[in-house]
Image (tube, grey):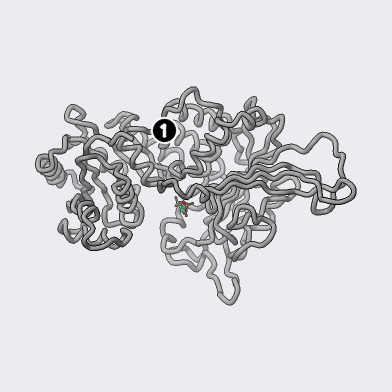
């Protein structure tokens, strides 16, 4: 693969968690794979005063240990620099400009810059604007790109305002809105599964598919992010962004080419075809829950309201399940279900396509072998892979049918390098490829879709928030949402469903 053009990557919010846990390790991974540009520097920026060396030492702790004499490791660390800056003060920015120019001169790097905003969202308008006003968006000297972490707004109005502000100073092609779900290999593989296999595409529609179920479960609670999460909740934190990207991949029409705008146009069309949920329908179509204290084994698990930074009367949802329809030729009449939550029994993200049963049932079915709904499970994480459930004959007399699993696991490709989501996305941005980044119109469309739900929850206190004991699959009432009350009970291992579920 061609190396990206030489550039400096500026990380705002360099002393934050994301930088050390995700960004620096992802960059190191790219370095090890020899995918970084020939001339490259990382400039960490935040308010704390620190020397380059002190910053390097901090970052070193988050890199996999290699021998102290490892020359490649030392070279990577030496490419990291640090600049303290009052990020919201325009008067401080000449300092940054000068530092970039000096670094560029010394390392012979042209004025190609990527600015990564790993800061609190309040700064998403401020930093890009000051950068542009201080002459750091001068395209005549090299490329200038901005990467923005989610959340892109907290509702429709704030998202529109943010986009409007960014687009005053930058073109859409310079803006890279990161959604780390799109960086996951298994999410990208959904496109390949659909569009490279002649057997799936002809049946990928309302003639053959009964319904689609998307699950994203986490065992963790809000940990030390209570302050943020209590103002966000599961709908904003997971559904409006990450899980909508999965919907886009599953439901889109084949793009004309694999190219940023072709793919993103198709995703947008899916969002545009989603039948709006009216405020009045929210209580029937969207269920929210919050985890309550419980015992898992010997351990007493805290309820959400007891978590640090969380209001003791909080009505923020840590679980959400919803049903929706996509009104187009392909999906007319096919219900889609999403559920996501914290403190569930296992960590798993997957999409299940339930195919319709055969029109006539010839065989003998028993309680555990009802007419087979063939299921195709696209597992995003963990035990990444694909599972197909098929009906097979039970050996012996008669024609008894049993469901069997045909499974493929990504770890069977152990000789292949699987990039982490952040390294894949960073590399794409370095190449100027926005295919796996969210475009402003799709972000706004997604907010538009969820706004009535947010409004209903805000305006109507009678809409219940159901408690569920930590470690369970969410409020029981959620079974009412799906026709036959059946949600798949996935386990850590892709093919071990229904056998046990680790707690
Ligand atoms: C983040 C959310 O965007 O995604 C977190 O803010 C969530 O609350 C995380 O835990 C899930 O990501 P992953 O990759 O672990 O599924």
* Spot occupied by residue 502 in the image (x, y as percentages of width and height): 60, 64
**157 vs 491: above or below:** above
In depth, the one of 325 and 82 nearer the eye is 82
Residue 191, position as x, y percentages in the image: 53, 34
* Residue drawn where x is 51% and y is 65% of the image: 305
Q: Position of residue 40 (x, y in %)?
A: 21, 43
Q: Residue furthest top?
A: 256
Q: Is residue 74 visible?
A: yes
Q: Is residue 288 above or below residue 434?
A: below
Displayed quadrant of residue 101: top left
Q: Residue at x 22, y 49 (%)?
A: 87
Q: Quadrant of residue 472?
A: bottom right
Give the labeled residue for mark 1.
435
Say few, some or many: other residues with alpha carbon within 10 Å of mark 1 (under 14 / 14 to 19 / 20 or more): some
Depth check, front residue: 422 or 476:
422
**Is residue 388 found left or right of 445 in the rendered image?**
right
Tell me the element at label 1: loop
Residue 322 at least partly seen: no
Image quarter for residue 452?
A: top right
The residue drawn where x is 56% and y is 27% is: 253
| Image quadrant in which the N terminus is located | top left
Count of marks placed on residues = 1
| Residue at 59%, 53% in the rendered image | 461
Residue lying furthest bottom in this view?
298
Report x, y in % for residue 225.
42, 60
Q: Which corner quadrant holds the C terminus?
A: bottom right
Mark 1 close to ligand 1, CB under 8 Å: no
Placement of 140 over or under 105, stated as above or below: above
Tell whether 323 sits left or right of 302: right
């Amino acid at each position: 693969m061609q190396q990206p053009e030489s550039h400096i990557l500026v990380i705002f919010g360099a002393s934050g968690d994301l930088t050390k846990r995700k960004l620096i390790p992802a960059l190191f991974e790219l370095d090890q794979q020899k995918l970084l540009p020939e001339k490259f520097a990382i400039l960490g920026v935040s308010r704390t005063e620190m020397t380059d060396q002190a910053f390097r030492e901090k970052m070193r702790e988050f890199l996999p240990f290699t021998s102290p004499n490892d020359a490649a490791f030392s070279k990577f660390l030496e490419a990291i620099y640090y600049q303290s800056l009052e990020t919201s003060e325009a008067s401080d920015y000449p300092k940054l400009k000068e530092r970039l120019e000096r670094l560029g001169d010394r390392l012979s790097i042209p004025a190609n810059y990527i600015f990564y905003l790993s800061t609190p969202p309040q700064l998403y308008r401020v930093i890009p604007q000051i950068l542009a006003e201080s002459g750091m968006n001068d395209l005549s000297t090299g490329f200038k790109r901005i990467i923005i972490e989610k959340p892109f707004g907290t509702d429709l109005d704030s998202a529109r305002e943010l986009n409007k502000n960014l687009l005053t100073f930058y073109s859409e092609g310079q803006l890279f809105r990161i959604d780390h779900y799109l960086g996951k290999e298994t999410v990208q593989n959904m496109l390949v599964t659909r569009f490279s296999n002649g057997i799936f595409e002809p049946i990928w529609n309302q003639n053959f598919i009964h319904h689609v179920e998307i699950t994203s479960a986490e065992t963790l609670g809000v940990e030390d992010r209570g302050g943020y999460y209590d103002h966000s909740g599961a709908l904003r934190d997971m559904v409006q962004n990450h899980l909508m990207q999965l919907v886009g991949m599953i439901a889109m029409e084949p793009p004309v080419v694999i190219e940023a705008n072709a793919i993103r146009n198709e995703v947008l069309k899916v969002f545009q075809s989603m039948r709006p949920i009216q405020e009045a329908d929210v209580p029937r179509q969207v269920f929210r829950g919050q985890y309550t204290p419980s015992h898992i084994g010997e351990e007493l698990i805290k309820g959400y309201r007891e978590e640090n930074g969380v209001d003791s009367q909080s009505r923020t949802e840590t679980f959400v399940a919803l049903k929706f329809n996509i009104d187009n030729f392909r999906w007319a009449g096919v219900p889609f279900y999403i559920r996501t939550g914290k403190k569930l029994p296992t960590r798993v993200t997957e999409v299940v396509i339930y195919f319709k049963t055969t029109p006539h049932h010839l065989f003998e079915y028993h309680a555990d072998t009802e007419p087979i709904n063939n299921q195709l499970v696209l597992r995003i994480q963990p035990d990444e892979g694909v599972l197909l459930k098929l009906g097979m004959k039970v050996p012996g007399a008669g024609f008894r049918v049993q469901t069997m699993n045909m499974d493929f696991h990504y770890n069977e490709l152990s000789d292949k390098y699987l990039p982490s989501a952040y390294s894949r996305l960073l590399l794409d941005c370095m190449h100027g490829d926005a295919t796996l980044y969210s475009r402003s119109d799709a972000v706004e469309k997604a907010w538009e879709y969820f706004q009535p739900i947010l409004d209903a929850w805000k305006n109507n206190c009678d809409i219940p928030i159901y408690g569920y004991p930590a470690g369970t699959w969410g409020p029981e009432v959620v079974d009412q949402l799906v026709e036959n009350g059946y949600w798949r009970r996935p386990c850590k291992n892709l093919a071990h469903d229904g056998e046990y579920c680790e707690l």
